[in-house]
Image (cartoon, rainbow, N blue to C red):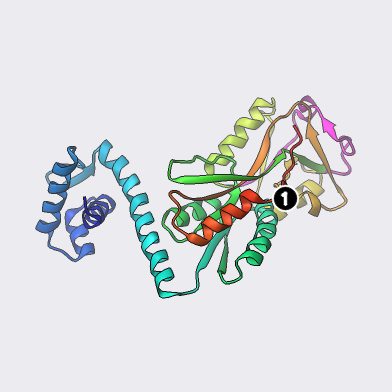
Amino acid sequence: MSFRRIEYFLAVARHLSFTKAARECYVAQAAISQQIKQFEEELGFQLFDRGGTSVSLTPAGEYFARRCQSVLTQYNGAVKQARTIADGEKQVLRVGFHGLSAQKIFAGHLRRFRAAYPEVAVTIQEANRDALLEDLRRGELDLIVAPDSGLVLDQGLDILELASTRSRFMISAGSPLAGRPVVAAAELTGLPLLRIQGKYGGNANHQRTDYYTRLGLGDNPVQWARNYFELLLMVEAGMGIAAIPSGAEEQLPEDVAIFELEGDAFRINTVALRLVPPVSVPADHFFRLMRQAPEEVETAP
């Protein structure tokens, strides 16, 4: 098996066209068709269904394409890192983060990393978690720090839990429920649930909906905000209750009260993710430092 054949295979898988794949790879269509045929013979299974002018991935080919993309990303990343080391160039740690909790946690670890490895340059990117995951899988980021709500992991990712907090809610200080540290879910029946549209992606929103349903609040009306600042204003105005984004507890205004739900064991985790096997040397050092860091997470049962 050669990486050239993997590149040809992935090009055809992306375009579902031998003609477009050949154009992308700057080879003749006959050559790329022959390479894919030999690749299938070598593997012992069919990668594509060829029906006249149409091409589609077989179930085995679809799975193989996902794994090959990960292998190719690892290979290209390893070559880039090795060339940087061989040429004596300054190494770079490329980190992405999402969420207030991720920002707060990452800052502390970054200080320790900078103290231990001052020679490594660091670039930081804040974005939606799904976008960060895509950049991580493409090899454009070395690691990301984000909430794990609704996260579905595959075998190509290494995960390290950095913090775990209870799910807390906020309500207007003028509400009769304000001032109570713990509230029974039954007391919230009928109150509008204030939520951020599309927060952390569709899977997380579905998970949060299931969470409210388990609490017996699935029939409560829902009002959507476009961002955290709109959400906070709606809470202050007494328009309903909202889950507090992890890391935001210390930044709430005085006219907002906080409470937990009685018997609620749901927790919000902040995690660091990187590709495995590791490619980035600075990311490997960063993960090692995070694993050795003193316990800084909430451990209340």
Residue bounds of the magenta highlight: 172-198
Q: Is residue 165 left or right of residue 250?
A: left
* Disc 1: CA contacts within 10 A as few (<14), some (14-19) or many (>=20): some
How many numbered discs sit on the rendered protein? 1
Q: Is residue 142 left or right of residue 184?
A: left
Q: Is residue 199 magenta?
A: no
Q: Is residue 138 left or right of residue 131?
A: left
- Could you tell me the amino acid type at mark 1? Gly
Q: Residue at x 66, y 40 (%)?
A: 268
Q: Residue at x 23, y 43 (%)?
A: 56
Q: Quadrant of the C terminus?
A: top right
Given residues 8 and 205, the one toward you in this image is 8
In the rendered image, is residue 24 in sight?
A: yes
Q: Is residue 181 magenta?
A: yes
Element under disc 1: loop
In the rendered image, is residue 53 in sight?
A: no
Q: Residue at x 20, y 53 (%)?
A: 17
Q: Which image quadrant for residue 299?
A: top right
Is 103 rendered above or below residue 224? Answer: below
Is 224 rendered above or below residue 177? Answer: below
Is 138 rendered above or below residue 240? Answer: below
Residue 99 x/y as whole percent:
64, 53
Residue 71 x/y as whole percent:
34, 51
Residue 37 x/y as whole percent:
13, 47
Q: Residue at x 36, y 63 (%)?
A: 79
Given residues 97 and 75, the one toward you in this image is 75
Q: Is residue 117 left or right of residue 164?
A: left
Q: Which image quadrant for residue 78?
A: bottom left
Q: Which residue is mark 1?
A: 247
